[in-house]
Amino acid sequence: MTMNKVSVVTILLLAFSFVGCDRKEKPEDPNPKGTTLTPQQQKREDSLKGKPFTVEELGLEMAWIAPGKFHMGSHKSEVGHQFGEEKLHEVIISRGFWMGIHEVTQQQFDDLMRENPSFLKGENLPVNNVNWWKATEFCKTLTEQESRADRIPKNWSFRLPTESQWEHACRAGTKTAFSSGDEVEELTKVGWYKAKSAGRRKPVGLKKPKA
């Protein structure tokens, strides 16, 4: 998968998953934090899995990404392949997770953090000019807010997705060069890229969603 990898650099920062349902190399490890859930806690966690999740106060919608396996990387014959890209190898996502259906917007970031560090301003534009430290601070603050209000199980937290989780979600079960097919022009249906965006950021949610 080639073009979607380029997108990781600019829109990975603020997509989220719950650690409580994280990718694990060893599926037998039932809880990444090592805590034991009570029957009531386990029942609550199980009742949320497989369904969309929304942080109501921010209007931050999250999609459930089911576990599965896929081939990560790019074959040399694939359109857009670049030197140094990973060779194709199988990756197993053994636990499902949630991921934001859009990039975090400037309005959402400002509502939680009381600041907007973005260069180009726009409430519904993706937040930008955010480094890793600020992104993880957003995750921590959101976790504390939702946990304190008892809107998420205590052993869950918001965080940045791994590269494997990101590509698993982007591929959406496809085996083509791009999630939209093998042709570059097909990308215009699902996302913005330099040649079609005039070099400007766009409001979230204007493109067709992936599967």
Image (cartoon, rainbow, N blue to C red):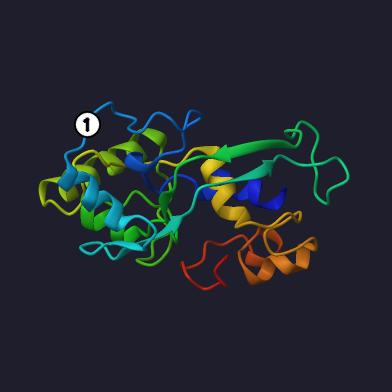
Hey, which quadrant is residue 186 in on the image?
A: bottom right
Q: Which residue is mark 1?
A: 36
Task: Tell me what residue is drawn at x 34 percent, y 39 percent.
Answer: 19
Q: Residues within 10 Å of mark 1 (few under 14, many from 20)?
A: few
Q: Residue at x 63, y 54 (%)?
A: 171
Horizontal and vertical percent position of residue 206: 52, 73
Q: Is residue 165 above or below residue 177?
A: above
User: Residue 24 versus residue 29: which sits nearer the camera?
Assistant: 29
Residue 18: image x %, image y %? 34, 44
In front here: 161 or 82?
161
Tell me if 204 is positioned left or right of 49 in this view.
Answer: right
Q: Is residue 50 left or right of residue 42?
A: right
Task: Please say whether residue 15 is visible from this viewpoint.
Answer: no
Which residue appears at 42% of the width and 57% of the height?
A: 64
Dot 1 lies on which element? Answer: loop
- The residue type indicated by label 1 comes to Thr
Residue 90 rendering spot, x and y as whole percentages? 68, 37
Q: Confirm whether residue 91 shows in the render.
A: yes
